Image (cartoon, grey):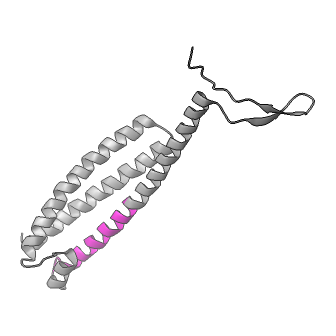
């Protein structure tokens, strides 16, 4: 097996790892929507493990492409596929590169959504804590006869108790 074929196998491994990372991100999104903090923590641990494996595979990818394109300051898969032309595994490498690009964009999209969901959950939590600790702002209420009166805010939890 030559270096280009080994490089193709490394890219295939990266594709599988990014697909696994995308699945973890989607599971975390579902856990965030369900407000299941234990599941979010499990998903975060899974993501960390997958990201660690991606780093290792990416280091191997960098080493392999540097060997395949000696003298290149910025060795890339595009330059490698151009140098290989139509001979194998050139077209397969181009397909893998495109698939990895799309997977990376999809992971980024899901992570942006997860970030927004985390922000929303934290804003809700902040509102709950503010209501418990400080009470609500003054608001108008109505008595039984329909006369408006001002309601004085007070905390739901008495801190002196």
- Which quadrant does the N terminus fall into? bottom left
Please state if 107 lies on the left or on the right of 161 as rendered: left
Tell me where residue 87 appears, x and y as whole percent.
15, 83
Q: Toward which corner of the image does residue 75 lie, by quadrant? A: bottom left
Q: Is residue 6 visible?
A: no
Tell me where residue 43 appears, x and y as whole percent.
36, 43
Going by the picture, which residue comes out furthest to the right?
145
Tell me where residue 131 appears, x and y as whole percent.
61, 32
Q: Nearer the viewer, residue 52 or 3?
A: 52
| Stretch in magenta | 88-107
Please state if 14 lies on the left or on the right of 148 as rendered: left
Q: Does residue 160 belong to the magenta stretch?
A: no
Count of marks overlaid on the render: 0
Q: Does residue 96 belong to the magenta stretch?
A: yes
The prevailing secondary structure element of the residues shown in magenta is helix
| Residue shown at the point (51%, 43%) measured from the top left | 121
Tell me where residue 5 appears, x and y as whole percent.
12, 70
| Residue shown at the point (60%, 22%) measured from the top left | 157
Going by the picture, which residue comes out furthest to the top?
161
């Amino acid at each position: 097996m030559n270096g280009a074929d080994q490089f193709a196998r490394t890219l295939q491994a990266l594709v599988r790892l990014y697909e696994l990372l995308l699945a973890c991100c989607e599971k975390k999104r579902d856990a965030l929507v369900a407000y299941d903090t234990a599941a979010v923590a499990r998903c975060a641990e899974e993501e960390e493990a997958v990201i660690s494996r991606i780093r290792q595979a990416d280091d191997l990818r960098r080493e392999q492409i540097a060997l395949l394109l000696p003298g290149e300051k910025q060795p890339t898969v595009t330059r490698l596929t151009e140098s290989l032309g139509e001979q194998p595994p050139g077209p397969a490498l181009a397909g893998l590169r495109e698939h990895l690009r799309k997977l990376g964009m999809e992971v980024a999209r899901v992570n942006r959504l997860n970030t927004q969901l985390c922000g929303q959950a934290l804003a809700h939590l902040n509102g709950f804590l503010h209501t418990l600790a400080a009470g609500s702002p003054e608001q108008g209420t109505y008595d039984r006869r329909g006369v408006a009166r001002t309601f004085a805010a007070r905390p739901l939890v008495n801190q002196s108790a």
